[in-house]
Amino acid sequence: MRALIINCTLKPAPQPSNTEALARVVAEAMEKDGVTVEWVRAVDHDIKPGVENDMGPGDAWPAIREKVLNSEILVIATPTWVGKPSSVAQRIIERMDALISETDDNGVPVAYNRVAGVVNTGNEDGAHHVIAEVTSALADIGYTIPGQAWTYWHLGPGPGPDYLDDQKGHDFAAKTGRAMAQNLVTVARALATTPLQAPPS
Amino acid sequence: MRALIINCTLKPAPQPSNTEALARVVAEAMEKDGVTVEWVRAVDHDIKPGVENDMGPGDAWPAIREKVLNSEILVIATPTWVGKPSSVAQRIIERMDALISETDDNGVPVAYNRVAGVVNTGNEDGAHHVIAEVTSALADIGYTIPGQAWTYWHLGPGPGPDYLDDQKGHDFAAKTGRAMAQNLVTVARALATTPLQAPPS
Amino acid sequence: MRALIINCTLKPAPQPSNTEALARVVAEAMEKDGVTVEWVRAVDHDIKPGVENDMGPGDAWPAIREKVLNSEILVIATPTWVGKPSSVAQRIIERMDALISETDDNGVPVAYNRVAGVVNTGNEDGAHHVIAEVTSALADIGYTIPGQAWTYWHLGPGPGPDYLDDQKGHDFAAKTGRAMAQNLVTVARALATTPLQAPPS
Amino acid sequence: MRALIINCTLKPAPQPSNTEALARVVAEAMEKDGVTVEWVRAVDHDIKPGVENDMGPGDAWPAIREKVLNSEILVIATPTWVGKPSSVAQRIIERMDALISETDDNGVPVAYNRVAGVVNTGNEDGAHHVIAEVTSALADIGYTIPGQAWTYWHLGPGPGPDYLDDQKGHDFAAKTGRAMAQNLVTVARALATTPLQAPPS
């Protein structure tokens, strides 16, 4: 079983990413459960705007799309900016839009029988909305969203420190992240045993 | 396998409910697949405000809560009002909030291994947001949201007719509803075979 | 100038309301600026479901609607439940839906030239989404939303204490509340001097 | 009085933009009312990811930021993708985030005394949510959102034609757009006469 974590931070490598730091908790829990985890830091790649599978010369999406299709589990890790998922996360969602109408040879949409979850960090507030925005988009595309398949960290109210700068709340975020990992893996296995079929006509 | 459809229309029986009319498509598809479907029209019951399992004398929630816990599948059917799920749908979500911290004897949250979806009708616009609001709340509580577990109907842009008053778009809404039914039932079966476990400590 | 604060707590009087406690900061700042402030605790009134101005015998809305129309400033004070505005807040919004199509003798929608803001308290997260949900509905209905016309309080991540049980963050919430009050009053005065007109045909 | 329309389509010039086509109705109505309207098609500029005013060599934001600060009126024109504002719109919002903490010499936040609205086109559904997401972010930053300061177009339910490909609903979208223009201009004038002040300490 394979998982892909797409880190949607606005900061290119090698800058430290708070979102990546929290996502690592989820990755380690999945790896302990036998899952192979791959990472993409999206901002380091030239993912062109558009909603086709390939937006032409220099587009980094086709290679990332292949990783998406090779993974039963997708984790979108995103910071909160002005209360919303990052522009990088929305770019990923837009490029995944083309999956809606793709099927395998049996007519099963390619996103079916895959599961998705969200890791979110921010300075202040907005995690549940960010999680709702990302998971609702991925469920539209065909991903199954396991119960409690998210973790997050911020302190409130008002602007505050980053995840890497304050240990407060890390226990909650880590414990929630380990439950998230378990739920993602279990539902991915459940769908492997009892898969979704092609939609009735 | 049992499904509960909670119709969150603002209109008490016996007024015709557009939302119920579309939800019937989903109910029939689940019944054909061997599922027992029960209905609650929430506005006809005195569901008290609050977030406890029982808000005291006259509270209709404890009886509905029992139906929720007897059902592997939950469908929230709600109209759109001013772009949001109805106040009746939000009342249901608030009363389900107490489920977050309840577990069975093995420590498994009671909402785990259940699936949920949304049926939505409106005059104009807003279905995907309504679906996102309801499913994100239910996923918080522990429900698994299968890929494409929703259907909706409205015409746009601007104010327009009700579902029962215009045949346009019924084909899309019905076909989507049948796929929703299939996906709900399949993921419920997948979880019955491969259930979610208690969260790791 | 008059302001109406509708407290959308789920708890009937005389239970203490965290949301009311924070809204008092906003009320006092408006009163110091010469505004007459009136309060409604919505859950104490039998506001019937529906979207007409009067839903029949026993409906408490017509009396509250009169207070809404007597006030240039409206403050919706609501707790966060499962990441959303309370069912009581959504009930208020639904009942205000009928204002969309009402105009004065000059064809000016009755909600024009009024301003609105939000006070929000919660245990955990979600304030900006709650504010977005309420203000976007009121802007649909015709209210003007001044810049930074909200305040909120919660601590995160994960479940935590109520506003009345922890002094942390009260300074931020109070300072933000005083700015909110000033912005509401200023934009209400700006609209009184330079009012919105009837929409062009 | 000056207005800036930022078109957040995913399609670079000279491809036709549905969103621009609808935004033109709003621009023309503002111009008739004496407003100077400037356009930016954001996807044609290399707006770097980040939340600082200048993200370094090649960053197109500083020049666009100057246009934002020269305009009392801002219109974000965005398509809907997977139910959300485009990644280009979110990029603009992220870059405007730095305005939150900037003030003029009197301590007045630079976004105060400016107004904003939204033009939205899509294939299917989601306009009110897109409007809520964009306006709530801009109100956080300090913009005032006039009552009914938006217009939109889509047909539903399900995937459908683009704005430029179907005349249905254009009347509603254009009439709503003219009202939007009038409300933006009127509230901008109201704030010029009766401006917001520095927040109380």
Image (tube, coloured by chain):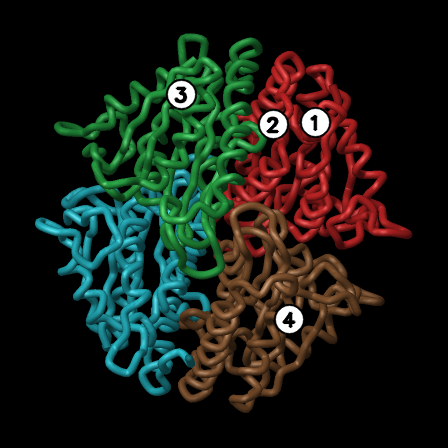
Chain colours: A red, B green, C cyan, D brown
In the picture, the quarter occupied by the N terminus of chain D is bottom right
Q: Residues within 10 Å of mark 4 (few under 14, many from 20)?
A: some
Residue type at mark 2: give it.
Pro
Q: Residue furthest bottom?
A: D34
Q: Secondary structure at mark 1?
A: loop
Which amino acid type is marked by label 3? Ala
Task: Kindly indicate whether the residues beneath marks 3 and 1 are on one polypeptide chain.
Answer: no
Q: CA distance from mark 2 to mark 4?
A: 36 Å
Q: Which of the two discs, 3 and 1, sits closer to the camera?
A: 1
Amino acid type shown at disc 4: Ala
Q: Say what secondary structure mark 2 lies in.
A: loop
The residue pinned by badge 3 equals B3
Query: Regarding mark 4 in the picture, which secondary structure is present there?
Result: helix
**Label of residue A199 in the image:** 2
Q: Residue drawn at (53%, 65%), measured in percent from left and top?
A: D138
- In the picture of the structure, the residue carrying the numbered disc 4 is D21
Closest to the camera, between mark 1 and mark 4, is 1
B52 in relation to A47, above or below: above
